[in-house]
Amino acid sequence: MQEVATYSTMTRSLLALADRLRDLGVTRVVMEATSDYWRPAFYLLEAAEFEVWLVNARDVKHLPGRPKTDKLDAIWLAKVAERQMLRPSFVPPREIRALRDLTRYRTDLVNARTSEKQRVEKLLEDAQIKLSAVASDIFGRSGRDMMAALIAGERDPKVLAQFARQRLRAKLAELEEAFTGHFSAHHAFLLT
């Protein structure tokens, strides 16, 4: 038996699809991986306790000259799966996917932080403030205090150098030299 129907990826429509598949006695659902569009359908059908196979588009070769539409693709995919000519891609279990999401998000945040730090250092260099030549970490407590003072309008190198703490206090003369630049209100706005 062959039935071709179209369902949207809205939740109610996917639930209706799951109900229809269950009514038909379907136990395995095979779908092609397309960007991230497969995820909602996969996750919902997986939660509905179907055996869901995600297959790589490369494994589902289309014949040259053969028309390619979503409906024809669905029929082709069903036939190839029925003949056991496919193997599912690995999709980690839900708990591992959640952990992956967290670690990837953390990686994105670290990358964003690194990018922002580089932007700030470039901004200071543009203003001829050479803080990074004196302080090994311009985002340490001393560096953050100095940048906060710059944002607040302080431009006197002697005053800015006095924000140094601990080991950086030994470099007051170098800090004064580093803060001799052309830091403007525009730079302060961008640093904020």
Image (cartoon, rainbow, N blue to C red):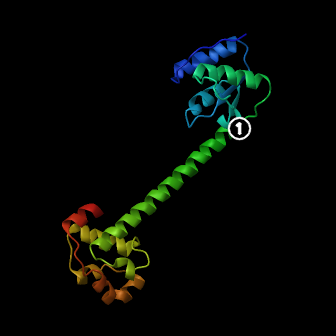
Decide which of 18, 79 is in the foreground and name it.
79
| Image coords of residue 159 (percent x, y) | 24, 81
- Image quarter where the C terminus lies is bottom left
Q: How many marks?
A: 1
Please indicate, yes or no, whether residue 91 appears anywhere in the rendered image.
Answer: yes
| Image coords of residue 53 (percent x, y) | 70, 30
Q: Quadrant of residue 29?
A: top right
Left-right relation of 170 to 76? left
| Image coords of residue 173 (percent x, y) | 31, 89
Residue drawn at 21 percent across, 80 percent down: 156
Q: Which residue is mark 1?
A: 89
| Image coords of residue 41 (percent x, y) | 59, 27
Left-right relation of 108 to 66? left
Residue drawn at 29 percent across, 82 percent down: 161
Left-right relation of 92 to 122? right
Figure check: 170 above or below 109? below
Q: Residue furthest front?
A: 65
Please indicate, yes or no, whether residue 192 appears anywhere in the rendered image.
Answer: no
- Image quarter where the N terminus lies is top right
Task: Identify residue type, mark 1.
Answer: Ser
Figure check: 169 above or below 189? below
Figure check: 125 above or below 113? below
Residue drawn at 33 percent across, 87 percent down: 174
Left-right relation of 109 to 93? left
Mark 1 residue crowding within 10 angstroms, few (<14) / some (14–19) / many (20+)? few
Disc 1 on helix, strand or loop? loop
Residue drawn at 61 percent across, 31 percent down: 43
